[in-house]
Image (cartoon, rainbow, N blue to C red):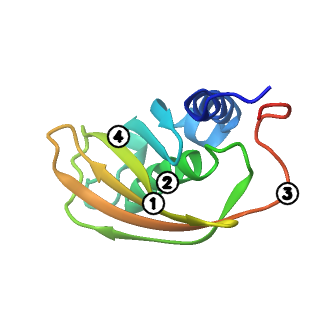
Amino acid sequence: MTQDPQQVAEAVGRAMAAADTATRELGVELLEAGPGRAKLRMAVQPKMLNAVGICHGGYIFLLADAAFAFACNSYNRVALAQRADISFIAKVAPDAVLTAEAREAAHTGRSGVYDVEVRDQDGTLVGLFRGHSREVKGTVVPGLT
């Protein structure tokens, strides 16, 4: 049975959130999932601070990369990162709550390009991420079409 793309994306999002140990251990929450898009949230924790007392860029990248992964896998076709980069726009305070919103910029054949904005709780843009994905064999949720 073919399901609505929104239902597929939500089911894939739930499955990924349950299976992704790295993000789950850091308290990353899935807020929204849809075809080619995802929105995640993460509260900065003391263990995420760098030597100058702000959020380490690696954690900002991790959050953006996770949103990218949720978005590019939302069609229930396993998609892996080919390339990704981030621009850090503003420093992130030790008590910040970050939201990463991923949107599909292009999807042709097995390749996709996704843009992710990372913002703090005040709406300040702190990071811009672009990820390139490549679909490989397999599905995220077997039997889901």
Q: Could you say which quadrant of the image residue 127 lies in? A: bottom left
The label shown at residue 58 is 1
| Secondary structure beneath label 3 | loop
Q: Are marks 1 and 2 in contact (CB under 8 Å)?
A: yes
Residue type at tag 2: Leu
Residue type at tag 3: Lys
| Secondary structure beneath label 2 | helix
Mark 2 or 4: the one toward you: 2
The residue that mark 2 highlights is 62
User: Could you say where residue 143 lies in the image, as x and y percent from the top left?
Assistant: 85, 31
The label shown at residue 7 is none
**Quadrant including the N terminus:** top right
Q: Earlier in the sequence, mark 3 or mark 1?
A: 1
Residue shown at the point (68%, 61%) measured from the top left: 80
Mark 1 or 2: the one toward you: 2
The residue that mark 4 highlights is 44
Residue shown at the point (37%, 46%) measured from the top left: 100
Whether residue 55 can be seen here: no
In three-dimensional space, the C-alpha distance between marks 1 and 2, rounded to whole angstroms, equals: 6 Å
User: Could you say where residue 83 lies in the image, as x and y percent from the top left?
Assistant: 57, 74
Which class describes the residues within 10 Å of circle 1: few (<14), some (14-19), or many (20+)? few
